[in-house]
Amino acid sequence: MTAQSLKLLNHLPMLDPASLHESTQKAIAEIVSEGESRNTRNSYKSAMKYWAVWYRMRYNQDFALPLQAPVVLQFIVDHALRYTASGETIGLPAELDIFLVENKFKAKKGHFSIATLLHRLAVLSKAHKVAFANPNPCKDPRVQELIGKTQKAYAKKGMYAIKRPALTKEPLVQIINTCDQSLKGLRDKALILFAWASGGRRRSEVSDAHFDRLIHKPDMGEYLYLLLYSKTNQTGQASASAYKPISGLAAQALADWIAASQLNSGYIFRQINKGGVIGEKLSPVSVNNIIKSRCKLAGLSDEFTAHSLRSGFVTEAAKQNIPIAETMLMTGHQNINTLMGYYREANVLESKAAKLLDNFTE
């Protein structure tokens, strides 16, 4: 090594091999954030904003990591529903509850659902992990025990997460029938069938669908879509299972939209203004709004959402006895237990065990 090289190295900051430099910690946080999906980043941002505001109002101090376990215990008590001799209550002072709602930090007054409470704790735990802030209060045995007991208490009250209804084949046909030959009608039909028939794509995956990853098979009248990034494939691996087929009615609807829109590059599904001019890509929220508006036109429940396409695909596959492995290749699920819930729900009324009394005679 030359003297000039040594002179240059002497000007570099010396790092401690036993700890991370502050700039390195910040860089790690930035990389982790960039690797998350847009929806995940937004949900984390919202949750941390809530933590900061709640903490400031509760303790009259600026929010800073790491938090102490008593703070997290107080957060749970403030937001979990419990029964007392005088009725249902939460620990959050009424005036603070009103403030949080009026300033749009909280959707409504009262307790959190168990899902929201668990999400807030998970985000706080992730924040400690990313920031290397120790100890992590969410791992404290007292916090773990309290949240476990809270989950059981909610379950005993019958307060559990209700699944959104599934858009199986029959209601899917109903919403498709609301799509006319207008530009919006062609787009919505193509979008809905693309999402459903390719394995129940998530709304963010539909929003991000790009012509660069769409492969036309004109001799077969079909398409293949290369799903390079998804919730279960966050490394962008182009494996065989990343290719999602779009055939039949879905392929025809997509071809009709492409022909009418005259698009051949960029994002596949776009905004359409009142003058019929095609604009920028649809956001995930817009995808969800399209599904809900089409369901309304079809006279279906307002509980249907974009996720109903995904659950509907899996449920319909179960009803038609499609092998679970084949369904998982389409959806990208990695946990078989998630799919089994749909399969049991779809097949429970067809079970022979449910019909043991059918031939009963007194």
Image (cartoon, grey):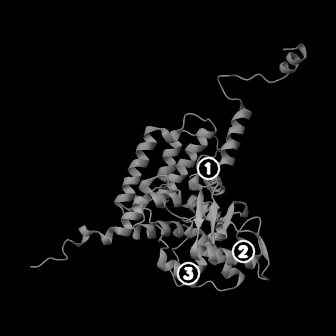
Mark closer to the observer (1, 2): 2
Asked if residue 303 lies left or right of residue 131, the reply is left
- Which mark is drawn over residue 234? 1
Q: Residues within 10 Å of mark 3 (few under 14, many from 20)?
A: many
Give the residue displayed 14% in from the left and 76% down from the top.
360
Q: In which quarter of the image is the N terminus?
A: top right
The outermost residue toward the right is: 4
- Do the CB atoms of the residues marked 1 and 2 lie less than 8 Å apart? no
User: Label 2: which residue?
Assistant: 258
Mark 3: amino acid:
Ile
Question: Label 3 to label 1, Cα distance in Å?
Answer: 32 Å
Residue 49 location in percent, x, y? 64, 53
Give the residue displayed 50% in from the left and 73% down from the top.
167
SS for dot 3: helix
User: Label 3: which residue?
Assistant: 175
Give the residue displayed 56% in from the left and 81% down from the top.
175
Is residue 8 shown above or below 129? Answer: above
SS for dot 2: helix
